[in-house]
Image (cartoon, rainbow, N blue to C red):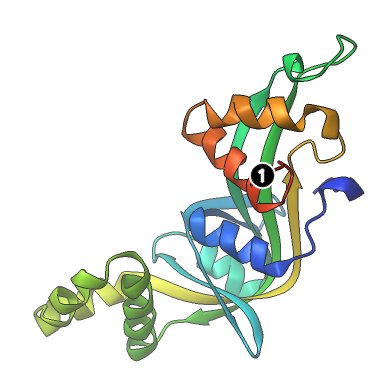
Amino acid sequence: MYMPPQFVAKDQAAAVALMRAHPFASLITCDDDGLPFVTHLPLHPEAGAGGLVLWGHVAKPNPQWRHLQARPRAVATFLGPHAYLSPQVYPDLQRVPTWNYLAVHCTVQARLVEDEDGKDALLKKLIGVHEPAYAQQWQGLDPGFARKMLAGIVGFELRVTDLQCKIKLNQHRPEAHAKQHAAYAAGGEQERALAGWMERLGMVEGH
């Protein structure tokens, strides 16, 4: 990812917060012809003593798990809020429009989770993240049906070996910050989320 120094976020906590708020990721591997293969899927980041790990799974007919088996190194990307920025936020007219956004790219080393107990534990972890109330229903399923569901997926642990977090919010243009924040705060969901990140980064006085 193109990383101008003014947009590099070095705080891993910010990256993890972004991934948790926007868990629908893109997992990118190379297929057998050497071309990129992309699956769009939720990935759950978990930080521990051993480093940062992403947990997820794909349907067994999806060939991507075989790519991970043959070539365990892959990339996972997360896209946070993004929105257009009008040049009207500047105090002069010699400006151009831009697009602001937040993104995280993770280089990962994959370990497949193929055994029934491992996949069950993985699903319970993800259920605990996305819908804890469903845990009781999952545990109460007919064992034969549950085994059939588990047989239909392949899980994986993606250990993050390198992480890039890009926060592009016009940080290097302080003369625009007040009007930029006001415009985003009055906008739609994406714009309001960017206004929140501006506040989090201390880009706006009084926030």
User: From the viewer's perspective, is 54 left or right of 118?
Assistant: right
Q: What is the crowding at mark 1: few (fewer than 14 residues within 10 Å), some, or many (at least 20)?
A: few
In the rendered image, residue 19, in percent from the top left (x then y), is placed at 56, 59
User: Which residue occupies the foreground of this view, 194 or 135?
Assistant: 194
Q: Residue furthest front?
A: 206
* Location of residue 192 with respect to 196 vertically, above or below: above
User: Which residue occupies the foreground of this view, 82 or 153?
Assistant: 82
* Location of residue 187 with respect to 73 vertically, above or below: above
Residue 158 visible in this rendered orientation of the protein: yes
User: Which residue occupies the foreground of this view, 129 or 91?
Assistant: 91
In the rendered image, residue 195, in percent from the top left (x then y), is placed at 60, 38
Identity of the residue drawn at 54% across and 69% down: 66
In the rendered image, residue 204, in percent from the top left (x then y), is placed at 71, 41
Where does label 1 land, which residue? 206
User: From the viewer's perspective, is 88 left or right of 3?
Assistant: left
Quadrant position of residue 89: top right
Quadrant position of residue 181: top right
* Location of residue 50 with respect to 32 vertically, above or below: below
Instruction: Give the amino acid type for the residue marked by disc 1 in the picture.
Output: Gly
* Location of residue 7 with respect to 10 vertically, above or below: above
Identity of the residue drawn at 46% across and 69% down: 56
Quadrant position of residue 109: bottom right
Identity of the residue drawn at 8% across and 80% down: 142
Identity of the residue drawn at 72% across and 54% down: 34
Residue 31 visible in this rendered orientation of the protein: no
Q: Secondary structure at mark 1?
A: loop
**How many marks are shown on the rendered structure?**
1
In the rendered image, residue 162, in percent from the top left (x then y), is placed at 77, 69
